[in-house]
Image (cartoon, grey):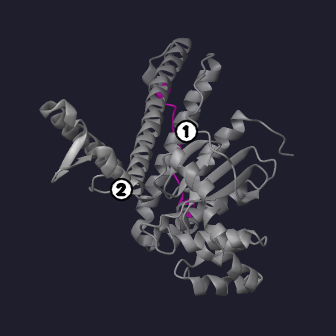
Amino acid sequence: MVNRLISGSKKPAWATGVALGLGLACAAHAANASSPSDQNIIGIIGSERLAEPEVIAADKLEFDRLQDDYELGRRELELKYAKMRHDLVQRQLDQRLDRAALELEAKARGVATDEVLAGLKAAAPTEDEVRAFYDAHADRIKQPYGEVASKARQYITNQRNQEATRSFYDDLRAKHGISSLLPPYRVSVAATGPARGGNTAAVTIVEFGDFECPYCKAAESSLRSVLARYPREVRVVFRNLPLTQIHPNAQIAAEAAICADRQGKFWEMHDAMYDDQSALSLDALKSAATRLGLDADRFSACLADGSTSRSLDLDAKAARELGLTGTPYFFVNGRPIDGDVPVEKFESLIRDELRRAPHDRS
């Protein structure tokens, strides 16, 4: 799941912008058709003629916002199309390469392809493994073990089958000299902001988050797990994307994080806000700052300083250019994923990135 500014059945703001633009164009065409001298005249008050540019200039800020919404929506669609196209090429390429590898293996053995596939099996999860999986994800599942054990077992089974199948075909490809040269889909995103993890990490995860977003909070357990498992290989960089239209405390929380960062306590404040998202009011944040050992006067002055809010502009601009409308959003070495990402998805991408960029982990 993901918190979004543009969602549901309501027409997106950018779509409204397109419709309005077409409407204005039609109005202008009608005016032109009636009289060449009335070009761009869209209203008459007595002897006064109102031109479209004059009407727009009266509230240019609103029209600028409309244009921004349109550009944001267009960019989001462009990026979504690019990723979907890449994923489709990847799927079709994999199918062709896997089929070729299977046929070559069958030919080498002198058997049918079905007989080669008969050896493809994954071990069924034990009861202890299912229980361990549940315990590791209990904070997300929020249901008694007995009610979800069968679903957990099926999930593990599916994951193992997928991994076994991929490993099987990868081995066949390697054996028969078949390889994919298609690189993963990546987006250029600056790793600018507070970071934790290995300074020379081969994998950088850039997160755009909102401290009041429940899905961001849920994703934290996955991030903490991968950092614990890959302390030198992975670095996590946090960038602010407060969704102020749906989260009333998101802006002040983001500013509190900045103020804490200026006193070297960003991650302490980050963790405190995600641990208790009900305590994001101004007074609660000041109390948290005191509890975390920040200078209370400096922290309060920072929150009151207008430049603190403006310091969020760099992240906001980056989010617009990336077409982001929801949180959490992650880029694993530029590879985009969004929502409450399970730890298995992060680990799969991390392992793939480590294979692509071997480095000394001694």
| Label number found at residue 47 | none
Kindly report which numbered mark, 2 or 1, lies closer to the viewer in this rendering: 2
Residue under numbered circle 1 = 164
Q: Picture coordinates of residue 205 (x, y %)? A: 65, 50
Task: Please tell me which residue is depicted at 45% across the width and 41% down the height of the picture.
Answer: 75
Q: Residue furthest left?
A: 34
Q: Earlier in the sequence, mark 2 or mark 1?
A: 2
Residue range (magenta): 116-129
* Residue 184 shown left or right of residue 78 in the figure: right
Q: Is residue 111 above or below residue 261?
A: above
Task: Please tell me which residue is depicted at 73% across the width and 58% down the height of the picture.
Answer: 195
| Label number found at residue 58 | 2
> Is residue 123 within the magenta segment?
yes
Q: Picture coordinates of residue 281 (x, y %)? A: 54, 82
Quadrant of residue 180 within the rendered picture? top right
* Residue 35 shown left or right of residue 153 in the figure: left
Whether residue 134 can be seen here: no
Q: Amino acid at mark 2?
A: Ala
For the residue pair 180 and 320, the one nearer the viewer reads as 320
Q: Is residue 338 above or below residue 18?
A: below
Q: Amino acid at mark 1?
A: Ala
- Cα distance in 3D space between marks 2 and 1: 64 Å
Whether residue 154 can be seen here: yes
Quadrant of residue 261 within the rendered picture? bottom right
Q: Quadrant of the N terminus?
A: bottom left
